[in-house]
Amino acid sequence: MRKYAGDSWLMKNVLRFSAKFLFQYRVEGSGDSEIIRLCEERIIVFTAKSARAALVYAKKYGKKEEHSYKNSVGGMVYFEFVGVLDLLDLEGCGPEEVWYDITRRKLPKERAANILPAEEDLNAIRNLNR
């Protein structure tokens, strides 16, 4: 049984993990050089009994998400799983937390206007306006 930091909820025999994936869109016959590709980074949260089991699950998930379709000009588009960018044991996270990253930045508070995107550029907000 594990107790999560800062919270009172308990998990029995199951651990929470978060996986960050890299997918690519590969378009055949687009006329582009095909070297620079549109990519998607996706994060999911799931449970597993161990880190190894979590990695196996994450890889299966990535492969399962692959698909293809014809675009509006008749070219084939392949959505392909590239790999797992990161896998986190979320033991130290509360139930509302799904991801974290620790980095070093030069004067982040002082440079916040340069580092942070405008609110209207955040994905969830931008998609509301479509």
Image (tube, grey):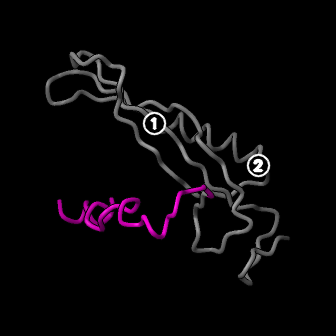
**Could you say which is closer to the camera, residue 76 or residue 106?**
106
Residue range in magenta is 102-130
Asked if the stretch drawn in magenta spans residue 74, the answer is no
**Could you say which is closer to the camera, residue 105 or residue 92?**
105
Specify which label sits upstream in the sequence, 2 or 1: 1
Q: Position of residue 40 (x, y in %)?
A: 41, 42
Disc 2 marks which residue?
51
The image quadrant that residue 73 belongs to is top left
Does residue 82 sit above or below 21 in this rendering? above
**Could you say which is closer to the camera, residue 121 or residue 59?**
121
Query: Which residue is found at the position 67% from the left and 69% from the top?
Result: 93
How many numbered circles are shown? 2
Mark sitting on residue 23 = 1
Query: Which residue is found at the position 22% from the left and 19% from the top?
Result: 30
Secondary structure type for disc 1: strand
The image quadrant that residue 12 belongs to is bottom right
